[in-house]
Image: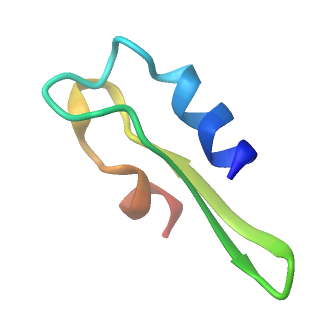
């Protein structure tokens, strides 16, 4: 969760009209992918991580 929040902080004030979001995909305790909402709100963090 801390990693996702840190990713989100990088986009503060840049993702309007969407919220600033960070996403970390984890399996068996290993972070497999990371993403955050891009400028202008697209793509969303989840899509960026995939």
Please state if 48 lies on the left or on the right of 2 as rendered. Answer: left
> Residue extending furthest top?
13
Occupied quadrant, residue 28:
bottom right
Which residue is painted at 53% across and 33% down in the image?
8
Picture layout, residue 33 above or below residue 14: below
Please state if 20 lies on the left or on the right of 5 as rendered. Answer: left
Q: Name the one closer to the observer, 13 or 40.
A: 13
Please state if 25 lies on the left or on the right of 48 as rendered. Answer: right
Which residue is painted at 86% across and 75% down in the image?
30
Q: Residue 49 appears at what percent x and percent y? A: 52, 61
Picture layout, residue 27 above or below residue 11: below
Q: Residue 46 appears at what percent x and percent y? A: 41, 61
Which residue is painted at 42% across and 41% down in the image?
21
> Residue extending furthest right?
29
Occupied quadrant, residue 34:
bottom right
Occupied quadrant, residue 2:
top right
Which residue is painted at 54% across and 50% down in the image?
35
Q: Residue 4 appears at what percent x and percent y? A: 62, 47
Q: How is the image coloured?
A: rainbow
> Residue extending furthest front?
1
> Residue extending furthest bottom?
28
Q: How many marks?
A: 0
């Amino acid at each position: 969760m801390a990693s996702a929040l840190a990713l989100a902080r990088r986009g503060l004030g840049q993702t309007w009209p969407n919220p600033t979001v960070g996403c970390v995909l984890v399996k068996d305790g290993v972070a497999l992918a990371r993403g955050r909402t891009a400028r202008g709100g697209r793509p969303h963090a989840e899509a960026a991580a995939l």
